[in-house]
Amino acid sequence: MRAYRASILSFATDGESGFGAALEEDGLLVVGPDASGRQRVQASGPYRQLKTRFPAVHIEHLPGRIIAPGFIDMHNHFAQTNVIGSPADGLLPWLERYTFPEEQRFSSAQYSAEAARFFLDELLRNGVTTALSFATCSTESVDALFCEAQRRSLRLITGLCLMDRHAPAGVLNLAAPDRSRSACEQSLLDSELLLLRWHGKDRLGYAITPRFAPSCSESQLQGAGHLAIRYPEVWIQSHVAENRDEIAWARQLFPSSASYLATYADFGLLRRRAVYAHCIHFDDQDRTLMRDSGAVAAVSPTSNLFLGSGFFDFAAADRVGLQYGLASDVGGGTSFSPFHTMLAAYYVAREGHSKTGLSLSPQQLWWQHTAGAARALDLEGVVGNLQPGCEADFVVLNPQATPLLGRRTAQASNLDELLLAMIVLGDDRLIERTVISQAQDVLLTIDRP
Ligand SMILES: [Zn+2]
């Protein structure tokens, strides 16, 4: 076992107090292996109280630092790291001009492995310890990301991208080499093989991954829905209602569905552990459908601002009780940094011309990227918080990382002021260390050089 003495940020766990954050100014975090060797939080609380309970445990003192739960990124694309910040006139031109040509390269296992290494290192450098990620339509890309995540003992969820139409040939799912199976049949078979190979192995999870309804034939969506029924513990990830052109297209392709979102429901793809990126252009019927199905939204504000897609309606989601959490959506999103994502969410919520504007509290923003995201992913009590039993994934923040951060955070007179100062001024420099729970009594520690 080992222990860390610092300020400790954590969130309410009773489900009643919502996101209630608390900062233990002089805290102690004790971590150690469970029966299977997995590193978990053993205790977290005031240093004065806990030091006598663990007299033999070595304590690392981190004065002036804040220990906080590792961040959870609810939606990103590991194959899009190289296209961040590409200029285009909205979502569909951006996909055609930059994203599809880059994703073609991931049919190479070697290219995929190098990209996976960079991507996961970048997540960790930014304090992201759990992610729900898109791979591409090549099985090589999925194996590469799982492999590299397993090597780092990360909690990572991904799956084979399902896309058998409406994209250049090089990025679509492929038919069996001997033509014995169509691209649709082969993609569903590959999904199941990958699922059986990776889901539940160490901390990895599989997600059935239709890219978005317009890119999938009816048979492919149907097959994905059958997999979702046969394997209720795996996740589902896709996109919905990001952009008005995309919605018009989806409505044209699936005219009998009540809405774009309802298309997914019609194919059995709305359920617990289903995560849909964006969810911008919804009405209350959509929000209610999503809430009642147990599916959740991955709100991706830097991406939505960058591609001019629109503004997620936080007030309407809260009114209906639609669950959501925050996501980078790299490479449509512009940053791996959870601080940039939280700040963009704050801007988007404030926008009050196209919808009701509101000021999200700093505690709520932070919760939506940690404990709240864990709840949305059905991983509450597993990651995203620091109560005993949680896997020991956490970050060490240095509020003096830059002159301005140091000057501003020193003026904070309460927790909300401190959190918002870090959200507004923070980036990867604020993350001094990222610690990942590992098996066999080892913690993976990544320090800033
Ligand atoms: Zn996306």
Image (spheres, helix red, strand yellow):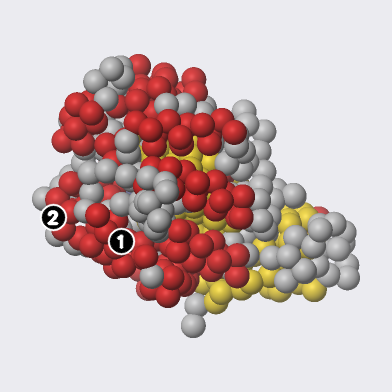
Q: Which residue is mark 2?
A: 88
User: Which mark, by number, is residue 119?
Assistant: none
Identify which residue is drawn at 46% across, 35% down: 223
The answer to which of 287 and 401 lies nearer the viewer is 287
Q: Residues within 10 Å of mark 2 (few under 14, many from 20)?
A: some
* Residue 230 point in image, percent of width and height: 59, 33
Is 427 placed above or below 167 here?
Answer: below
**In terms of secondary structure, where does tag 2 sit?**
loop
- Residue 58 located left or right of residue 421: right
The answer to which of 269 and 367 lies nearer the viewer is 269
Q: Earlier in the sequence, mark 1 or mark 2?
A: 2
Is 102 placed above or below 260 here?
Answer: below
Identify which residue is drawn at 41% across, 19% down: 288
Q: Which residue is mark 1?
A: 103
Is label 1 or label 2 in front? 1
Whether the residue under disc 1 has CB within 8 Å of ligand 1: no
